[in-house]
Amino acid sequence: MTHSAGEGQVRSRAGLVLSAVLAGGTLLVTGSACSQPPPARQPEVLPQVEAPYDLAVSKALDEVPRSEFVSLSLRPSDVRPEWLVRVADDTGSVRLVRVAATDGRLLGTSVPAGQSAGLKKRTAELVAAVRVLPEEAVDKVKKPDFGKVSGIALEEGPRGEPVWSVTVALVEPIRERVYEVDAVTSEVLSSLTTGGDSGTPTATDD
């Protein structure tokens, strides 16, 4: 099944997606997206990103058969920026796929450590609760100053509900905007902007 998105197409198999974050080799399901804003991206990275986020997702799904999209982030590099895409099999086991953000080439695949049986079970439960595809969440937050998607993650909300965190990197002025989108109803819940002249996070209601 193929679904259109703002910067190409993201494929979803059975419509199942999950969000999570890998920290120190351990898979951590996070809480509110806007409570922990990511650091501003290096300004020189954005012009190098020629392969859009959805191409990286498709590459990862092709690389790991019978997998589902988990999360995606953009990693700056002195050599070339990389997309870090996480996909999960039907047991909830996650694999990390690295894709060049410059030309979409596959760079490697690995299995993150620290995936306990309980964590895999919770991953599967969150995946099953999702009703809104990642590209649909991206479409909900497009604005006149919309930049490039630099991250997508489906996080557990305060009541255990699935929430998409969509991070958009903007160039003028250099900053990032993080949106929370309900992964069941597609309602935009909140947004937070980091970077810019002051470097102070600013929360807004959409």
Image (cartoon, grey):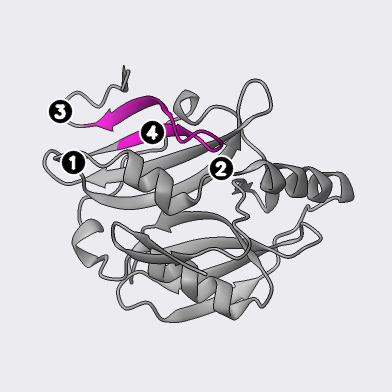
Element under label 3?
loop
Looking at the image, can residue 151 be seen?
Answer: yes
Q: Nearer the viewer, mark 3 or mark 4?
A: 4
Disc 4 to disc 1, C-alpha distance: 17 Å
Q: Is residue 65 left or right of residue 77?
A: right
Q: Residue furthest right?
A: 117
Q: What residue is at 15 percent from the left and 28 percent from the top? A: 197
Residue interval drawn in magenta: 177-195
Q: Amino acid at mark 2?
A: Leu
Residue 89 location, quadrant: bottom right
Query: Does the rendering let one see residue 77?
Result: no
Query: Amino acid type of disc 1?
Result: Ile
The disc, 4 or 1, on the residue closer to the chain's N-terminal end is 1
Is label 2 in contact with label 4 (beta carbons under 8 Å)? no
Earlier along the polypeptide chain: callout 3 or callout 4?
Answer: 4
Residue 185 rendering spot, x and y as whole percentages: 51, 33
Disc 2 vs disc 3: Cβ atoms closer than 8 Å? no
Q: Name the secondary structure under disc 1.
A: loop
Q: CA distance from mark 3 to mark 4?
A: 20 Å
Q: Residues within 10 Å of mark 4 (few under 14, many from 20)?
A: many
44 vs 121, left or right, is left
Distance from disc 3 to disc 1, alpha carbons, whole Å, reads 8 Å
Give the numbered dot on residue 197.
3
Q: Residue 8 lies in magenta, yes or no? A: no
Find the distance from the CA under tag 1 to the CA under tag 2.
25 Å
Q: Residues within 10 Å of mark 1 (few under 14, many from 20)?
A: some
Kind of residue at badge 3: Asp
Using the image as rendered, state which of residue 39 and residue 124 is in the foreground: 124
Q: Circle 4 sits on which residue?
A: 179
* Residue marked by disc 2: 154
In terms of secondary structure, where does tag 2 sit? strand
* Left or right of 156 in this view: 42: left
